[in-house]
Amino acid sequence: MGDNPHVADPETRYARSGDVNIAYQVVGDGPIDLVYVPGFVSNVAMTWTVPDYAAYLRRLTKFCRLIIFDKRGTGMSDRVAGIANLETRMDDVRAVMDAAGSSRAAVLGISEGGPMSTLFAATYPERTAALILLATSPRVLWAPDFPFGEREEEYDHWTRQAVERWGSPEFFAELVAGFAPGYDEESRAAMGEYLGQSASPGAIATLDAMNKQMDVRHVLPSIRVPTLILSLTDDTHVVVQGSRYMADRIPGARLVEIPGRGHIPTHENVEAFIGEIQSFLGRASQATAWQDGDHNRVLATLLFTDIVGSTSRAVELGDRGWRELLARHHELVRGQLAQYRGQELDTAGDGFFARFDGPARAIRCARSIVAGVGELGIDVRAGLHTGECELFESKVGGIAVSIGARVASEAGPGEVLVSHTVKDLVAGSGIEFSDRGARELKGVPGEWRLFAVERA
């Protein structure tokens, strides 16, 4: 394994995330924990068989305790049915960190791993000492306000080609030539084998389906940890422009564009990448935030619920009957909050205010509440918004709270209404929405596009 004795024969271990086993390795013993979030596909058991890739990771272990893993459904991790959304992937990262004994780490997200790493840093700043984004973009597809994305028909064509040709040595050679043109012949051949052992054609189709929907642009201003963004000058248009887009919107982010072709570090430019990463982590580790952390601002999904027509129902039932109904309602809501890891923040009369660390869990909780209270003979409306919140003691404040409350006020009986931000963050969750159009929310600037949950 070269000149670093700490990376010889790394052991593949497994972290339990829900009912799924996530394969990971811990390599090196540097003073900084660095969680390496893989891109498209990976295989930790074969990582060290690709000379150029192994040399790059070995350089990281000279100053970091490197934690690498395979996303669920890829490499040595368990195969799973369906698409793993960003929220589930965040759970997997936390499980790996816990298993590796890492309470706080720098997170390096490469390519497809960038959006999840971005969301993780905003949601769990207490566990993220610093954020490094390499060769990535906040979304993939073109949009009127993201004109450098790929056109959907081009993206779908590539996916079809990848699924049909996956396993072909010729196809792997084309892939490697595109994303790592600086690899030597041995590394190109080894990387082709690595790709073939990392995923099946079905997994490729599933991964591409999720990546096509991802959009974390709304999250960028909420990141409060030191951030470094790296890309090669001759990477794809969406990566180069997407990196610049993120740098403009993440507070205090540093953007470095390294001369070169391709998508990932190779022997032609690895020292430039390593130098930037080592220097950045050195500066970040000296910052007060690395030691103590400034965790009073986090990204959270806020849920508001209230009973529709509560006044008339209270009159109909009388004081005692109404109190009994409320007690049953409160018990049901609290049971669902516990099941979906929601934190109750306030209860006022017949309404609940709760916080979640994942929007998909929050949506499913809201749907369960709406369905459950129907058996009590009442209707509940629910609204959700994901945004940056200020934490103080057991309270949550900020404009996100006002937006969440206003979204809820727009919902009809038995309806779960969400903001556009929530919808964008649950790509791959299987949750379906119907567009309710743009609304003006009282006391909140601008128009807000709202969506009703149709299926969760």
Image: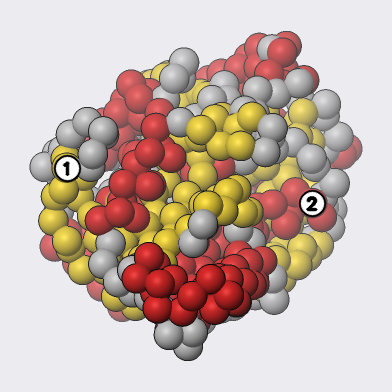
Question: Looking at the picture, how far across and down is residue 209, in whole percent?
Answer: 34, 67
Q: Position of residue 294 (x, y in %)?
A: 65, 23
Check disc 1 and report its element: helix, strand or loop: strand
- Residue matched to label 1: 440
Question: Which residue lies at the image location 56% right of the left edge and 53% below the top edge?
Answer: 347
Note whether 146 is above or below 157 in the view shown: above
Closer to the camera, 450 or 331? 331
What is the quadrant of the N terminus in the image? top right
Q: Which mark is residue 98?
A: 2
Disc on res. 253: none
Q: At label 1, which amino acid type do we have?
A: Glu
Identify the image quadrant of residue 257: top left
Residue in the picture at 44% in, 60% down: 305
* The furthest residue to the bottom: 375
Residue 296 visible from this viewpoint: yes
Instruction: Check disc 2 and report its element: helix, strand or loop.
Output: helix
10 Å neighbourhood of mark 1: few (<14), some, or many (≥20)? some
Q: Position of residue 423 (x, y in %)?
A: 33, 57
Looking at the image, is mark 2 or mark 1 earlier in the sequence?
Answer: 2
Residue plotted at (30% across, 34% down): 242
Structural crowding at the residue carrying mark 2, measured as other residues with C-alpha within 10 Å and reported as few (<14), some (14–19) or many (≥20): some
